[in-house]
Image: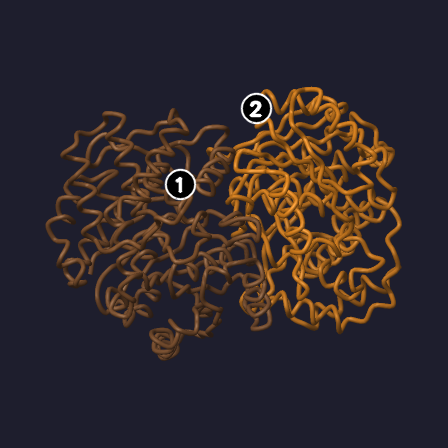
Chain colours: A orange, B brown
């Protein structure tokens, strides 16, 4: 088991990563003096796989634990689900002294975290992410929230968990496409801040794709360390944290063009990183060999869905919304080499369209 | 004008208190580098009195300001109103770079603060409280939130404003009963932490009741200083902050017994402080002369509504809910003298009933 400490003064917490972690959750909670009254938020699918056993273990260990099941999927990540959870919590007598445990993927973690942030002005909570994407990305950094019918992630709070438990065994049940989707966020960390990690990823890609536990423990804990470093230094997303958006400007545009259908977030980021690499090459930031090496590695992760039927209008519209959001310029995270970034806001629309056409037609 | 600084590391902010403050809001915002895009949340009544003029001044000063009017009253302090504000904000193009200004009483401040805390995971906001209660209590300390249909203030967040502007001129429009209600929270500060302030309050009660600006400036700024000290030392309501609940245990029980009708929060706290004083006397914490002096001062603030028709059942029920919330014991804030408190959790039910009967039948 590896332990990553997230340093945030009096709100510091541990991320525990390893196999057999789920069985030891009661022990980890007890060590940290957790409250006896726990509410386990999960969806029916994950609850059946891991939640029922976890609940039994918590009860056996003397916790007063109750499950709250929410519907699965991004389309339920909204205030209605949040309000349903509040109502259930209150009806079950939850109070300031209760804690929340979020067991599931990114959607469950985002919703559970937001409920924890806003119930009685904040109660303690534990994240148990069960997808690769949630393990390396959304469970670290304290971003919680839900979508509004007019836009994604518009409602939320920065709120840190008291503990994050990553059980590598949960990866076994993850569908191949979801696992692959998480790997794009994994390789991102190497590209933006850790050349050595990129080398490791590239050399061990086959073992990673086979989900070899020792390799995945190293990979996930390194991602958590890197995200923890960046977010500790910049909790509320000023400049530094922006580098985590590498590949996300094009990625978001692609997701918008796809209307969030048939394209997973990680896949969109995969394409987005290719675009950002091409852009970095065009600006002379990296040489052709480096660009080729990066793009080759991204393609080796797996087959990306076809996007050659996307037109650039919807994408440009999404980018212009991003632009407005950022105060009239888009900040592009470019590479200056593997493990080094540069933020540029001087990218012209023609350049964007050219790059867009290259990535959408290339395969 | 007085300035009270609330010290909370990088989230420190100023409370400005004086006459003519509303006219200088654009100047104060500009000094603090506020964002250009502002959303002014208020209710129709307060907006007509002060908001329209403020909006014009903001526009003249080059701010891009838009009003968002919400219905008045505690019964609209809920998630529905919050969601309506989100929708309006998004439709008007509000983003992470927008700021919110909450102009009104406690309800407006609590809702506005919660929206600011949760829109795009937190945007800057300014509190302009226009009632005495909001000026001395709810606008300081960072508590924001709304009610759930199953209980008051169950949904919320700790979130600090960037600036609080208290314009004493707004007190002129406050109905006498609301002003009086605020005075109970004012005298509370003297009783729990500042004997000298209690002396001042007692000696200047007539000038205070006449709302003499120089006196009110001193009174309100002292209350803000004291609340700022307590909440800076204990932002998230652990032990220290509890003393602010002096008079509130009985007060909440009275409000519940009254079903929040015909009894204002401050009035309930007024009765609650009398009860807590009687309890402090019973426990031998204070002598009879001190108890008499305190109770006399509270009664001199003004006529309290009759409560002799309240039965103690509903009150005890409310207290037992409080009890459950606090982990099986009620923490009573008692006085050990004027300006000094003691937290006790060993008060028996018979004692509570006896005190309840005394305060409800006394007048």
Front one among A219 and B342: B342
Placement of the N terminus of chain B among the 4 image quadrants: bottom left
Q: Is residue A171 visible?
A: yes
Decide which of B107, B16 is in the foreground and name it: B107
Q: Decide: is A22 above or below B300.
A: above
Q: Is residue A5 above or below residue B80?
A: above
Mark 2, chain letter? A
> In the drawing, does residue A8 fall left or right of residue A302?
left
User: Which residue is disc 2 drawn over?
Assistant: A32
User: Is residue A187 among the parts visible in the rendering?
Assistant: no
Please give the name of the residue rendered at 29% of the width and 61% of the height, measured from the top-left corner: B177
**At x 26% / y 28%, what residue is drawn?**
B282
Instruction: Write down the chain letter for disc 1.
Output: B
* Disc 2, SS: loop
Whether the residues at callouts 2 and 1 have beta carbons within 8 Å, the answer is: no
- State the residue at coordinates (74%, 42%): A69
Q: Position of residue A122 (x, y in %)?
A: 53, 42
What is the count of numbered marks?
2
The quadrant in which residue A45 appears is top right
Q: How crowded is the residue under tag 2: few (<14 C-alpha within 10 Å), some, or many (20+)?
A: few
* Residue B216 x/y as whole percent: 19, 58
In the rendered view, would you say A165 is above or below B87?
A: above
SS of the residue under disc 1: loop
Specify the label residue B235 is tagged with: 1
Q: Position of residue A116 (x, y in %)?
A: 59, 42
Task: Describe residue B136's horizontal placement relative to residue A260 as left or right.
Answer: left
Cα separation between marks 2 and 1: 22 Å
Front-lying residue, A100 or A23: A100
């Amino acid at each position: 088991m590896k332990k990553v400490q997230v340093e945030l003064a009096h709100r510091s917490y541990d991320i525990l990563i390893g196999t057999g972690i789920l069985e030891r959750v009661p022990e980890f909670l007890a060590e940290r003096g957790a409250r006896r009254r726990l509410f386990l938020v999960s969806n029916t699918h994950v609850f059946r796989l891991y939640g029922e056993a976890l609940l039994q273990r918590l009860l056996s260990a003397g916790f007063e634990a109750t499950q709250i099941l929410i519907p699965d999927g991004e389309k339920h990540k909204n205030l209605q689900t949040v309000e349903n959870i509040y109502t259930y919590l209150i009806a079950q007598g939850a109070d300031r002294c209760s804690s929340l445990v979020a067991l599931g993927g990114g959607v469950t973690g985002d919703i559970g975290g937001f409920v924890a942030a806003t119930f009685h002005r904040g109660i303690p909570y534990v994240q148990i992410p069960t997808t690769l994407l949630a393990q390396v990305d959304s469970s670290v950094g304290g971003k919680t929230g839900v979508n509004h019918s007019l836009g994604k992630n518009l409602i939320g709070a920065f709120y840190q968990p008291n503990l994050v438990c990553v059980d590598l065994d949960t990866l076994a049940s993850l569908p191949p496409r979801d696992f692959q989707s998480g790997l794009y966020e994994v390789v991102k960390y190497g590209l933006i801040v850790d050349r050595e990690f990129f080398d490791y990823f590239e050399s061990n890609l086959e073992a990673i794709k086979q989900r070899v536990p020792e390799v995945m423990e190293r990979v996930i804990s390194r991602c958590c360390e890197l995200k923890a470093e960046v977010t500790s230094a910049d909790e509320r997303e000023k400049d530094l944290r922006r580098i985590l958006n590498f590949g996300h400007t094009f990625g978001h545009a692609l997701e918008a063009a796809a209307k969030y259908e048939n394209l997973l977030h990680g896949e969109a980021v995969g394409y987005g990183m290719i675009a950002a690499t091409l852009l970095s090459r065009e600006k002379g930031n990296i040489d052709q060999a480096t660009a080729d090496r990066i793009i080759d590695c991204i393609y080796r992760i797996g087959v990306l869905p076809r996007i050659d039927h996307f037109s650039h209008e919807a994408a440009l519209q999404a980018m212009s919304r991003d632009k407005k959001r950022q105060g009239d310029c888009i900040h592009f995270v470019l590479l200056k080499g593997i493990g080094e970034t540069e933020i540029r806001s001087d990218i012209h629309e023609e350049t964007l369209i050219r790059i867009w056409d290259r990535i959408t037609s290339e395969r």
